Every structure is written in C-alpha cells, then in structure tokens.
Image (cartoon, rainbow, N blue to C red):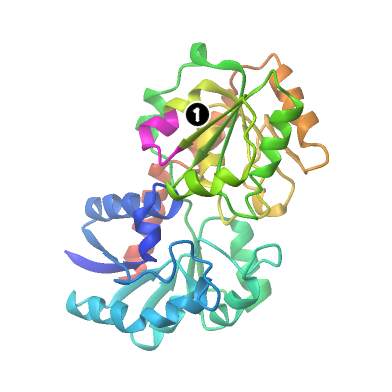
Amino acid sequence: MKKIGLVMRKIQFAEAQGPRVFAERLQTIGRELGVEVVFISPDRYVSDYDQEKGFEYEKGDLCNYDVVIEKLQQEKIEHVIYTVSGFSFLKLFFEKSVLFPHSYPNPSLTGHEMMRPFYDIVDKAIVHTDYLKQSFRDDFNVTDVDVIPIGFEERLALEHYDPSQVVGNRVLWIGRDEPNRRPDLPLAYARSNPDVEVVMVFGGMRYKESMKKYEIPSNVKMHFALSRPEIFELMNSAKVYWSSSVFDTFAMPLSEAMAMGKIVVKPEHPCYGHISSSHTFAGNEKNWPEIVNMALASSTVTSDDNREHAFHMFSNTVMKQGYERFFENWL
C-alpha cells in the first residue's frame, strides 16, 4: 500500500472541527483506494491558542520542521499533503509536496501578511472550490491546482434527516471564538430576538473558556466538541443555518446544512459562491437579522433543492472520486 503523509498542526488533529474531520475522511478514502494516509504533526504546540505573540500562525511552524521531517523520513514517506502554508518549505525536502489549505492569505483574515510569503513558495495545491483555484492563479500565479471538496457523510445525512423534527424558531450557527467567525453577531441577534432559539456550536472545548467573556442571552444554547452524529442530529432540528464568517476556504458546515435541507443564510463574499441554490440567501451584518427572520417565517420547512445540490456537489462520493483521480496522477 502506497504511503502519503498528511501534515497538520497538533491542535488541528486534537479538536472536533474541520481539519480533523477532513483528515479522518481522507484517511478512510485512502484505505478504500489502496493508499495509507499517515498523520504527521509536531510534538510540541506553538501555542494552545495559535496566537501567542511572536509565534502565531505560519511563523511558528518554522520551529517544527525538524520534528516533521524526521517523522516523515521514519515512515519512509515521499508524498506529502500539508494543510498549513507554514510547512511549504517541505518541498525542499520532499519533491512531491502539495498544499491543501485550511486558510488563505485573504486581507480580511488576521495574519494574512504572515501567510503570504509562504504561499509564494507553493507550486501545487488541492483546493475546495473554484473560487480558490482562481485565487491561486490571480494572486500567486499557481496553475497546478485540483478542486476537490470536503465531502459530507451521506450516511449521516440520510439517517438524521427528518423534517418532522425541525424546530420552527431554531437558528443554528457553527464556528469558533475568533474575530473572523464573528460569534458576537448571533449573540447580538439573540438579544434582539428573544423569541428565537439560537444554537451555537464550537469545535473545541477551549472555546468554553473563551466564550465566558461574552454576556450570553438566555435564548442561546451552546455546545462544544460534538461528535459527527450529534452535529447532524442538531442540524436536522434547526430551520435556519446561519454563517457570519468573514471568509472561508470551504465552509464545511454550510455544505452539511444544505445536505440537511436547511434554509441557509450566508455572507455575500464570493468565496461562498459554491453555496448556491433555491434557499441560500447572502447578506451582511446590516441585513442578516432581517434575512434570518424572513427565513424563519418562510413556509418552507426543508429545502429539497438545497439537499439535492449538496448531494450532487459536496458528498463523500464526490470527494472520493476527486482523490481517486488525483492519486492516479500524483502517485
């Protein structure tokens, strides 16, 4: 069985959110395709919060090259997928290295200046959306780019789909307590709409502590580090899924919300262009409250169009087909 290394930060493997979900899904798909995906991460954290002064974001990854290279060599790995651009120097040691970014140096993101020099080194990438493929071409003149979405689990989307369980006044938000995710917006919305139940889900237990700085309205329910079945069960119960992020490379919960037939309220930034169907509505901090309220008042309980679009574009089957083509050429 051919081996490839998947290099991520230690904290990304540790938390129940996007990067780890992607890693586990890729490992499973790899086994089905005869490829062993070996998880590689530094033995040491840069910071529990990834933002310690002097070592935030990509800059801190430079401290871990010795650890990462040693692990890859011990596993006799020649092909590497890395998800953080701070590890882009790996191509100096492993010719077959490809970036699969969980972030991007967009001006709206904190730390984008620090990411940019690392992206200047990248020559091959896998991305989640056509928007990112075009961004690589426009911003860094990188044209060797494959588009493969992070696929949701069809089994969970089928098992937990039950329109009779939708709570008519429930809005679901999934994110992190970080500036670009803007958790303050659903909190402000909840204060102004006490008759609406706002459910906020965070991928890691560390956010249980950081969210204490906010005054949490009584109509807000918070959950931390839920399992995948719990996510889909909760997603099924909401009528509206709302994302308030500034920028995303893919926005996995948005695709999952579509798969569960939710009415989706999203940002108007073009990076969310792939989230597009009959019941997806784009807005901003000025009009989101009105859009969310209109969505809650809609006679539509679940959207068959959104669900069909998601299964066609973002399912685990689509992801597997994409990696089957990619591995055939890359390996």
Give yes or no for residue 134 being in the magenta stretch. no
Q: Residue furthest bottom?
A: 92
Q: Position of residue 37 (x, y in %)?
A: 26, 61
**The N terminus - image quarter:** bottom left
The residue under label 1 is 235
Write down the quadrant of residue 83 in the picture: bottom left
Front position in the image: 108 or 136: 108
The quadrant of the rendering that contains the C terminus is bottom left
Q: Amino acid at mark 1?
A: Met
Q: Is residue 298 left or right of residue 122?
A: right
Figure disc tally: 1
Q: Quadrant of residue 132?
A: bottom right
Please give the name of the residue rendered at 48% of the width and 43% of the height, measured from the top-left corner.
208
Query: Residue 65: x, y in percent?
Result: 36, 82
Say which of 183 and 153 sits in front: 183
Magenta span of residues: 224-232
- Give the structural element (helix, strand or loop) at label 1: helix
Residues 327 and 226: in front is: 226
Q: Looking at the image, is 44 positioned above or below residue 162?
A: below
Direction right: furthest residue? 286
- Which quadrant holds residue 192? top right
Instruction: Using a 10 Å C-alpha cutoff, classify the residue at mark 1 as few (fewer than 14 neighbours), some (14 to 19) or many (20 or more).
Output: many
Q: Is residue 267 above or below residue 68?
A: above
Residue 213: percent from left, percent from top: 60, 46
Q: Residue at x 67, y 36 (%)?
A: 187
Q: Residue 141 placed where, x, y %?
A: 62, 78
Horizontally, residue 109 falls left or right of residue 225, namely right
Q: Residue furthest top?
A: 164
| Side of 298 where 114 appears, left or right | left
